[in-house]
Image (tube, grey):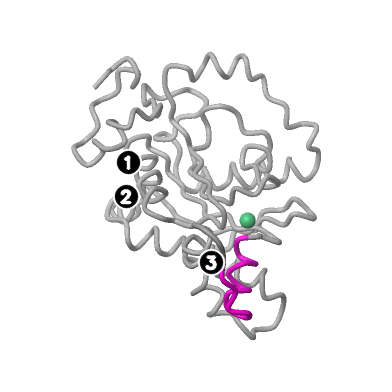
Amino acid sequence: MCTTCYGGAPPLRRRHFLSAAAGLALAASAPLAHAAGGAVSPDEALARLRAGNQKFIAGPQLCEADLVQQRGRVAKGQSPWATILTCSDSRVSPELIFGGVGLGELFVARNAGNVPDTAVMGTIEYGAEHLGSPLVVVLGHQRCGAVAAACEVVTKHMKLPGSIGPMVEAIVPAALAVKGKPGDFVENAAHESARRSAGRIATRSEIVGHLAHEGKLKVVAAFYDLDTGAVDFMS
Ligand SMILES: [Zn+2]
């Protein structure tokens, strides 16, 4: 393994060899004074996200970062203090909605519908175990197109083209679970899907489960309101 690419970090354990072999630019190095994932507790990370979102709601103009200075600080390594799984939706940018979080602070996995598939599970495990990220947030959002498609599969038996169908299929159980309940079907399904995904990550990953048992990691579900900019942490 090229130690330069990994900032001189300890070698990955055997179960991480795939990501290392793939040449991911996931550098781990000595903890950073400002963004040391391993030095931040799960509750402190959650408090930072809450405060950042309040900052975003109150005054987005404050979300300006000195990116040049940040780039230099994290170029040799990263210690992100939170991992965010969210939708690829262009309106849901974690670094912005959490108050202008800078380079090297959030470890982010995104796909349409924020589905914890195999690649995402591996990403989350890498962030938790190797980079020391103490918090995993599954962030669903209002008017999610992928969730809306899953709802249409449920109500209209809609067939989706290409790989979109199998991707959306993972959200269908959440849509089925809330079908017919009071409120907006798509929003209810998005909440349910985020909750289920958080539960799946916490219970099906041995790595996450072990760290959570030791009090070093939390997994929470959250929902982003496109209209207000507010993130509601559900758990
Ligand atoms: Zn979405």
Identify the mark nearer the N-term, 3 or 1. 1
**Which tag is nearer the camera, tag 1 or tag 2?**
1
Instruction: Say whether marks 1 and 2 touch (CB < 8 Å).
Output: yes
79 vs 72, left or right, is: left
User: Are there few (<14), some (14-19), or many (20+) residues within 10 Å of tag 2?
Assistant: some
The relative height of residue 63 versus residue 5 in the rendered view (above or below) is below
User: Are there few (<14), some (14-19), or many (20+) residues within 10 Å of tag 1?
Assistant: some
Ligand 1 in which quarter? bottom right
Residue named by callout 2: 211
Which residue does the image show at 66% across and 60% down from the upper left?
Answer: 144
Please state the horizontal and vertical placement of residue 32, each as a whole percent of the image. 45, 23
Secondary structure beneath dot 1 equals helix
Q: Which residues are magenta?
A: 146-159
Which residue does the image show at 31% across and 56% down from the upper left?
Answer: 205
Please state the horizontal and vertical placement of residue 7, each as a whole percent of the image. 35, 18
The relative height of residue 169 versus residue 126 in the rendered view (above or below) is below
Identify the mark nearer the N-term, 2 or 3. 3
The relative height of residue 3 versus residue 19 in the rendered view (above or below) is above
**Which quadrant of the figure has residue 141?**
bottom right
Which residue does the image show at 64% across and 86% down from the upper left?
Answer: 180
**Which quadrant of the figure has residue 95?**
top right
Q: As shown in the figure, which amino acid type bears the numbered disc 3?
A: Ser
Q: Is residue 224 magenta?
A: no
Secondary structure beneath dot 2 equals helix
Q: As shown in the figure, which amino acid type bears the numbered disc 2?
A: Leu
